[in-house]
Image: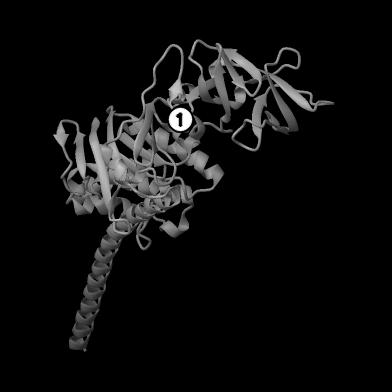
Amino acid sequence: MEIVLKGLTKEFDNKKTNSKVVAVNNVTIDIASGTLVGLLGPSGCGKSTTLFMLSGLLSPTRGQIIFGDKDVTSLEPQKRGIGLVFQNYALYPHMTVLQNILFPLENIGMPKEDRMKRAEEVAKIVQIENLLDRKPSELSGGQQQRVAIARALAKQPDVLLLDEPLSNLDARLRLQTREEIRRIQQTTGVTTVFVTHDQEEAMSISDILVVMKLGVVQQVGKPQEIYDDPHNLFVAQFLGTPPINTFTGEIKNGGVYIGEEKIMNTKLPDQKVYIAIRPEGFIPDQKNGVLTLKLENYEVMGRERSIISTHPNCLKPTIRSTVDEFDPTGLENVKFKLKPAKVFLFNYDTQIRIAEDKEYDAPEFMDAVEQVQLEPNEKKNVFTKFADKSKELVNKVASVFKKKEAKEDEQVVEEKVIAETDQSSQEGEGE
């Protein structure tokens, strides 16, 4: 199922300042059928809000959501053909794994025989067929996540939506489960949108990444392409582990300078710039190096070797360079040659990438973003509140299901009491 978002915007009223807060601003992207797309960004960037608009749990202020050739912008969630996996899994604790998977199929009125067949099929896909009789409390976090995915897949959705599905797992289990999610998506071929703030997760399993900041799409592309060709400083700094090293510098007389050292030639006009260098872009060379850094430490952790250094023009307290081999004996300073493909220049004022052979555009957003008259810290708090509001909305939806379950449980108890009463009456009559 192809997904098209056209100018998707979500505004909330900020009563404190009597203005509009734009949580998602003019998001326009095309998602090809059968791909896994990662919505990536820090907390408050609008990624979960975008996902909830895709699901129908939130209505957009402006814009369109199109599934295939159908405009679903105003369509109710249950009519969109989606499967949604929440961050907290939202499994029904008193039901077995099988009952959890069967629940949405019962709601759509699927015949019992077909329900059982479909539940067994998805259980095999996510590899939990031997856990069907267990309750959620008897499962590990990774197993619970697979049950939640199986339940979402049971209805054979056209689109699978995952809201930070790995955030509650420990590091080792997170690695294993993200591989499982990728395998499941490739097995089913369902178009999947995956929300995360973890760039390593997003880069490892996504076909396409959508990087967001404060509701605005910063860059869309294949993970490695975005890593190798960031369009602005935010994207360069957000992607990469260890993170990129950023320096203040300038272009003058055909050279790029960090402090007094010329690190490379350029045809770009003279200007003040940010210079960002990937950790793997440094080559230690005491004889021919172009950049001198003060050596602080040399770390060896398994197969990874890192030189820790400092420079007055660096935005961070320390600079991390990953190298193959290095002998720090007797050195106070380290000189480096630089790999040109790992060095990026950004306009100092706009933070947009600049290069000799390519022109980069600023992220597109509507003027409504200018209505947000908030101080930086206050703005962050507001976006956090609306992230909480989205989670609150999810909890309300879960609450509706729980009330329904409770009602069903009461009905079962009532029927049991009536049956026992009838049996007692019959036994009394027999005597």
Residue that appears at 65% across and 27% down: 321
SS for callout 1? loop
Residue that appears at 21% across and 45% down: 61
Colour mapping? one colour
Quadrant of the image for the N terminus?
A: top left
Residue picked out by circle 1: 349
Quadrant of the image for the C terminus?
A: bottom left
Is 337 above or below relative to 429?
above
Residue 295 or residue 425, whichever sits in front: 295
Residue 112 in the image: state x and y as whole percent.
21, 51
Q: Is residue 180 left or right of residue 428?
A: right
Residue 214 in the image: state x and y as whole percent.
38, 42
User: Can the viewer see residue 156 in this picture?
Assistant: no
Q: Is residue 349 left or right of residue 9?
A: right
Question: Residue 51: which quarter of the image?
Answer: top left
Type of amino acid at the residue the image marks with label 1: Asp
Residue 322 or residue 157, whichever sits in front: 322
Residue that appears at 30% across and 29% down: 34
User: Can the viewer see residue 33 in this picture?
Assistant: yes
Residue 184 in the image: state x and y as whole percent.
38, 36
Residue 335 or residue 162, whichever sits in front: 335
Residue 86 or residue 422, whichever sits in front: 86
Total marks shown come to: 1
Residue 97 in the image: state x and y as whole percent.
37, 53
> Residue furthest toward the right?
330
Q: Is residue 353 left or right of residue 287?
A: left
Residue that appears at 67% across and 23% down: 323
Label 1: few (<14), some or many (≥20) within 10 Å?
A: few
